Amino acid sequence: MRKKLLVLGLAAIVGASSLPAVNISAKPAIMTAQKDDDEWDDEDSGWDEEDDDFVEECTELTKGYIVASPAKKTIQAGKSFTIDLYPSDAFEDEYGDLPDEEWDELIDENIDGITFRSTRSSVAAVNSKGKVKGKKKGTAIIKTTVTFRDGSEGTYKTKVYVTR
């Protein structure tokens, strides 16, 4: 019985030594295993579109990854503009520049709700889509509150100056 275990143990060691070496390398927000260079197939480039899709699925937006734009705006009474959400510098530093359609998908996947509120709706009113309309001369702040899928919230401010 002891000889049999010794033979099985040696077989395991010999078998393990014939396995290809694996290197671990970090990609944005995930770990991937890569074969040694001599183990690659001609068609296998390592990082592919499926990996990009996986990174997008793993990207979780948080307050620091979003900015409401514009941060301040001067408009005439009767004129309007729309507040929109954009990637922050911190997001772009970590994930790079995303095409608009991919950013919109991240917003849809990571945000449960967006609300807009004016501190002085008699000066600047805002609707549920973020369209701000100047009413009369003065200053107002539009607060954009974003509710993320994890239940956290981020509040962003846009200062609006309305002229005659």
Image (cartoon, helix red, strand yellow):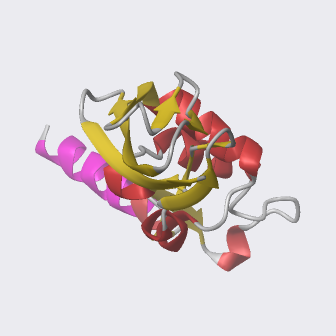
Most foreground residue, 64 or 116: 116
Most foreground residue, 72 or 75: 75
| Left or right: residue 7 compared with residue 122 | left
| Left or right: residue 7 compared with residue 142 | left
For this orientation, the residue located farthest to the left is 2
Rendered residue at 36%/27% (across/down)? 149
**Residue 19 visible:** no
Rendered residue at 64%/35% (across/down)? 105
Q: Position of residue 114 (x, y in %)?
A: 44, 28
| SS majority, magenta | helix
Q: Position of residue 136 (x, y in %)?
A: 51, 41
State the extent of the magenta-drawn residues as a range: 2-15
Q: Position of residue 148 (x, y in %)?
A: 35, 32
Most foreground residue, 15 or 155: 155
Q: Is residue 11 above or below residue 38?
A: above
Rendered residue at 25%/27% (across/down)? 151
| Quadrant the N terminus occupies | top left
Most foreground residue, 1 or 152: 152
Q: Is residue 125 above or below residue 82?
A: above
